[in-house]
């Protein structure tokens, strides 16, 4: 592994390479595809938070707000062992903080003074928080349909909020603002994949390698990060197996499902799961590859199922947002098939941001 | 210390004693004053969350939602070392989860099927969450003036919400409902003092004993718990000093300040800090005693200062509620007097619950 001494940008499609500390690229400057970051690794955990895995990261941020080291709650249900990973207890209320802590530190070190990001919500909140932490000025572009609480939080964190009619417009609007600013581009960024890989390391240390992981798929940062993390543990001879993937998408935005199973016609909607409403994930090919290799099942969910699952999770003491409840729908769908196994369920985002929108009807009590 | 083999209720005022596992008392059945729980202790940390300190607890709850083991963020500011303890990243968004995890487990073990609590907000949310976790039916009594997000959350967690005109009425209304139900009574309960003592243990293990701790004082559970925890570490010869206390109250409810410094006349209001609006804390005598013995300063804060401090903390990456910002007002007030020292600032509650009420004006950016 001594072929690179310092971290490199690498395009797996056209072979483009450059030193990570030379210039920032949010996509390959030669062929326009998503980049990777390659660097030496060694599994040598020490300390707390994502910095515990410094030896598995390309660099270690100098500042922290407590991202990582989230609780793992173990429950025996229906003959299986469920591992709930409480990612919603990250500092800005979602797992995105792991990747953002890396990305914004990098942007700061490379010399940017302002950051900009298009987001369905959680990443924008996270980017606002870490940008201010390093003294950078954040601009966050969000659909006006995003939950009120998420928009209020972006403003409260001191970011400039730009609202667009929908998520797709946010993704195009951002390009008018990226000149001379650090464009986080989390749906493209390899930093978010590295960030999410630390979830795999924490689960491995606390509970070993699970048999399955149920993972919501939006832009794919979580699924690619988890599988990357588990595969690296195997490559480094720390672990000897990886979990099989159970992917979850919503009916309204299911490009991975469609690539694997063919197109669907359905009147069902899934916009309550706003965090996985990603129609054109830049890393779609990679996600499909990973699901083909390591996938066990891909499950589609709708609004009604999401709300039921949301209040079941609330009643179980997990205060999550609707997007995060999608994994519980998927678990219920496949629970008999995976009976007797150990199943990881990452609970990705906090329900405290969506209280006003998703209050249950009076007397609602599914359990 | 072999005088008691199993945990006991003890009234320090009249000497009443009973086995903890015999009957539940929310106050002394003989003289009506607040009780203590006494039991063998030994500092032998192992594992994660509050269960890490099982050897310092009267019992260990069988269920967890990840309470405790919150991040400690270290910042060097103005020549001092500030230790921010991120208690708002507890499972229901406040430090109350530590005490509630103990209290509700106890109520469940002693045989209750329903719980009831009067609260300004956070304790009710916490009680709802842990009650459902053990299959108990929670009733939560809150002032109708409580933040919308907090009320929505209590309902979403499956509790019955009873709204009263104000916090004092909640405290009297509850007595019509305590028959045959487990009355949590957190402002009286020693379980919340034991719960908060685990914060002291975590800080000690991660950063040693700080010189000062700045602590918001409402019903006193936090200040009594912290000082109890630090004193126990000294008694067990684990540590050899304790921090000095800097207490914080709001102008609108400052019984501890008044007991120490005499009555005040002020037009200033502090109701934004709803979590410390406690006019008659049952443990007032104990709090005043502790402040007389270990207090360095007691600071009063008003709404305007609280809001300024709140958005300063947001800009520093701490998403807290207004009540929690009171400690930052206090720090700024006394920062030159304590220069060069190590200061613990517990950040008690999540700002995600109060987003709608306390959104800053457009363009607000104090830093």
Image: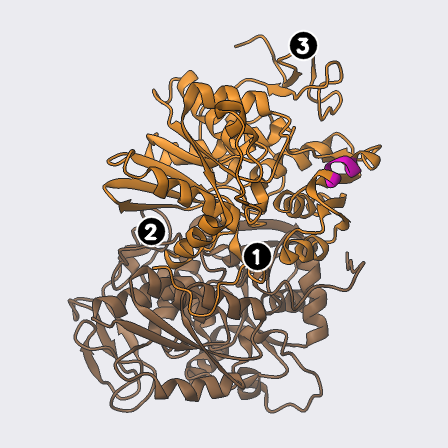
Chain colours: A orange, B brown
User: What is the chain identity of the residue bearing mark 1?
Assistant: A
- Tag on residue B52? 2
What's the CA distance linking mark 1 and mark 3? Answer: 42 Å
Q: Which residue is mark 1?
A: A354
| Quadrant into which the C terminus of chain A falls | bottom left
In magenta stretch: residue A171: yes
| Residue B112: image location, x then y, percent | 24, 72
**Where on the picture, by quarter, is residue A332?**
top left
The reply to whether discs 1 and 3 touch (Cβ–Cβ < 8 Å) is: no
What's the CA distance linking mark 3 and mark 2? Answer: 51 Å
Whichever of callouts 1 and 3 sits on the residue coming sooner in the sequence is 3
Q: Which residue is mark 3?
A: A14
Q: Residue at x 58, y 56 (%)?
A: A353
Where A227 sits versus A120, above or below? above
Q: Nearer the viewer, residue A242 or B160?
A: B160
> Viewer-nearest of labels 3 and 2?
3
Q: Which residues are magenta?
A: A169-174
What's the CA distance linking mark 1 and mark 2? Answer: 32 Å
SS under mark 1: helix
| Residue A82: image location, x then y, percent | 32, 42
């Amino acid at each position: 592994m001594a072929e690179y001494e310092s971290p490199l940008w690498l395009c797996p499609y056209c072979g483009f390479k450059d030193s990570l500390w030379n210039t920032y690229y949010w996509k390959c400057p030669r062929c326009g595809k998503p980049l990777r970051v390659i660097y030496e690794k060694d599994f040598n955990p020490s300390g707390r938070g994502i910095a515990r895995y410094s030896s598995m990261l390309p660099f270690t941020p100098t500042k922290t707000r407590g991202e990582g080291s989230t609780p793992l709650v173990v429950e025996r249900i229906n003959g299986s062992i469920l591992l709930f990973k409480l990612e919603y207890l990250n500092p800005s209320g979602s797992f995105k903080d792991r990747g953002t802590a890396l990305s914004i530190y990098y942007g700061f070190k490379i010399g940017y003074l302002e950051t900009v990001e298009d987001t369905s919500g959680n990443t924008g909140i996270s980017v606002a928080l870490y940008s201010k932490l390093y003294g950078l000025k954040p601009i966050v572009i969000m659909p006006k349909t995003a939950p009120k609480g998420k928009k209020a939080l972006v403003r409260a964190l001191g970011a400039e909020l730009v609202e667009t009619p929908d998520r797709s417009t946010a993704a195009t609007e951002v390009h008018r603002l990226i000149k001379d600013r650090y464009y986080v581009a989390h749906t493209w960024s390899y930093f978010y994949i590295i960030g999410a890989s630390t979830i795999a390391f924490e689960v491995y240390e606390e509970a070993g390698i699970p048999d399955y992981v149920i993972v919501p798929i939006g832009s794919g940062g979580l699924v690619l990060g988890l599988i990357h993390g588990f595969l690296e543990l195997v490559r480094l001879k720390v672990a000897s197996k990886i979990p099989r993937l159970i992917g979850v998408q919503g009916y309204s935005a299911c490009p991975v499902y469609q690539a694997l199973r063919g197109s669907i016609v359905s009147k069902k909607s899934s916009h309550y799961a706003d965090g996985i409403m990603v129609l054109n994930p830049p890393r779609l090919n990679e996600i499909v590859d990973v699901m083909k290799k390591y996938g066990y099942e891909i499950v589609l969910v709708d609004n009604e199922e999401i709300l039921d699952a949301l209040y079941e999770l609330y009643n179980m003491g997990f205060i999550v947002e609707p997007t995060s409840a999608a994994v519980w729908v998927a678990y219920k769908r496949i629970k008999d098939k995976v009976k007797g196994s150990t199943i990881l369920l990452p609970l990705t985002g906090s329900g405290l941001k969506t209280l006003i929108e998703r209050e249950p009807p009076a007397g609602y009590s599914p359990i």
